[in-house]
Image (cartoon, rainbow, N blue to C red):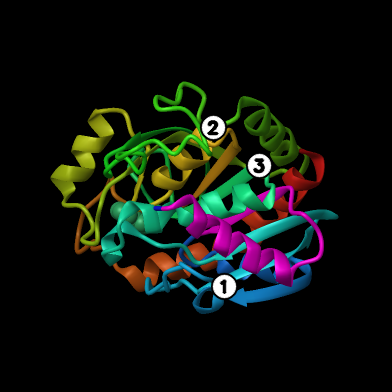
């Protein structure tokens, strides 16, 4: 995508907001209500922003919201774009580059994910400590030097200091956190029991259909990243008549969004 297109979107958003954001937040399925915690919000529907796509996934609203969280100027995406919706990767990740042009230094990504670690249960919050990207790499194509280098490092994609800070805050809030590896698959079908078992065997703890493209593009642009999954279903047991259901996934994410919100607000205030 032309650099100009990112600039156009960023200029439009800048014309609507007052403070320069320091932190960007991407709210996943069922977690969009977190945006209600943002003080003095300016809400910009994606449909108004030049070159933005429109979100269609269940549990996703389509707004760009600026305001403050924990006293820090933030921009949040209430709803993200997924590869399974048919968007090219450059459209899926465009908002991250736009947020970079708005001046963010930290990106917080959240998602609903299936737990494949047998110690995980519905409602658990998992710090993403690393990922396995099984989606097409969003940086394929000519490298845009305006953002970063051709071969960006991914050894510490998830910022160690932010992970340590989140763990300290969780202890203070008496909140139990899981920590693990997130694998992203295209979806939109959920995995078969054999597939959940496969991803468990190769080292993943949770599985979802998003997040890694945005993280790769953010790291390319030198943005520090913190990621959190809400475990919304259990891909490790299939006894009885167990099935996976999209509405139940959204409901489980909704149920956890307050807990996750409290943690993230505090993380942003202290980061
Ligand atoms: N698989 C893939 N994506 C998901 C799941 C899952 O089990 N749960 C929530 N998002």
Asked if the magenta segment contains residue 11, the reply would be: yes
SS for callout 2? loop
Please give the residue where the numbered disc 1 appears in the rendered image. Answer: 63
Q: Residue at x 45, y 72 (%)?
A: 59
Point out residue 160 in the picture as x, y percentages from the top left corner.
Answer: 61, 26
Residue 109 higher or lower than 31, as above or below: above
Q: Marks 1 and 2: which is nearer the front?
A: 1
Quadrant field for ligand 1: bottom left
Q: Marks 3 and 2: which is nearer the front?
A: 3
**Circle number at residue 245:** none
Label 3 environment density (alpha carbons within 10 Å; few <14, some 14–19, many ≥20) = many
Q: Residue at x 68, y 37 (%)?
A: 166
Label 1 environment density (alpha carbons within 10 Å; few <14, some 14–19, many ≥20) = many
Q: Quadrant of residue 38?
A: bottom right
Q: Mark 1 touching mark 2, by CB under 8 A?
A: no
Please give the residue where the numbered disc 3 appears in the rendered image. Answer: 106
Mark found first going from the N terminus, 1 or 2: 1
Point out residue 197 in the picture as x, y percentages from the top left corner.
Answer: 20, 39
Assess mark 3: CB under 8 A from ligand 1?
no
Magenta residues, start to end: 2-27
The number of discs equals: 3
Q: Is residue 231 visible?
A: no
**Residue nearest the viewer, comparing 147 with 253:** 147
Q: Is residue 70 left or right of residue 255?
A: right
How much space separates mark 3 and mark 2, taking CA atoms?
11 Å
Q: Is residue 159 left or right of residue 124?
A: right
Q: Quadrant of residue 33?
A: bottom right
Q: Quadrant of residue 43?
A: bottom right
SS for callout 3? strand
């Amino acid at each position: 995508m032309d650099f100009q297109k990112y600039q156009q979107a960023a200029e439009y958003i800048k014309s609507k907001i007052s403070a320069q954001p320091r932190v960007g937040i991407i709210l996943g399925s069922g977690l969009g209500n977190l945006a209600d915690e943002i003080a003095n919000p300016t809400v910009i529907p994606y449909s108004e922003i030049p070159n933005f796509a429109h979100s269609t996934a269940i549990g996703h609203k389509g707004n760009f919201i600026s305001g403050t969280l924990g006293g820090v100027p933030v921009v949040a995406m209430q709803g993200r774009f997924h590869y399974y919706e048919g968007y090219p990767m450059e459209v899926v990740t465009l908002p991250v580059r736009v947020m970079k042009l708005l001046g963010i230094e930290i990106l917080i990504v959240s998602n609903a994910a299936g737990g494949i670690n047998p110690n995980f249960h519905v409602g658990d919050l998992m710090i993403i400590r690393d990922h396995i990207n099984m989606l097409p790499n969003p940086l394929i194509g000519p490298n845009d030097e305006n953002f970063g280098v051709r071969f960006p490092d991914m050894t510490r994609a998830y910022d160690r200091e932010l992970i340590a800070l989140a763990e300290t805050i969780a202890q203070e809030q008496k909140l139990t956190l899981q920590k693990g590896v997130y694998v992203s698959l295209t979806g939109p079908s959920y995995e078969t029991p054999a597939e959940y078992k496969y991803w468990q065997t190769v080292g993943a703890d949770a599985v979802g259909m998003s997040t890694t493209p945005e993280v790769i593009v953010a790291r390319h642009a030198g943005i520090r990243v913190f990621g959190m999954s809400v475990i919304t279903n259990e891909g490790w047991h299939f006894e009885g008549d167990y099935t996976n259901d999209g509405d139940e996934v959204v409901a489980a994410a909704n149920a956890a969004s307050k807990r996750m919100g409290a943690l993230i607000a505090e993380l942003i205030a202290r980061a």
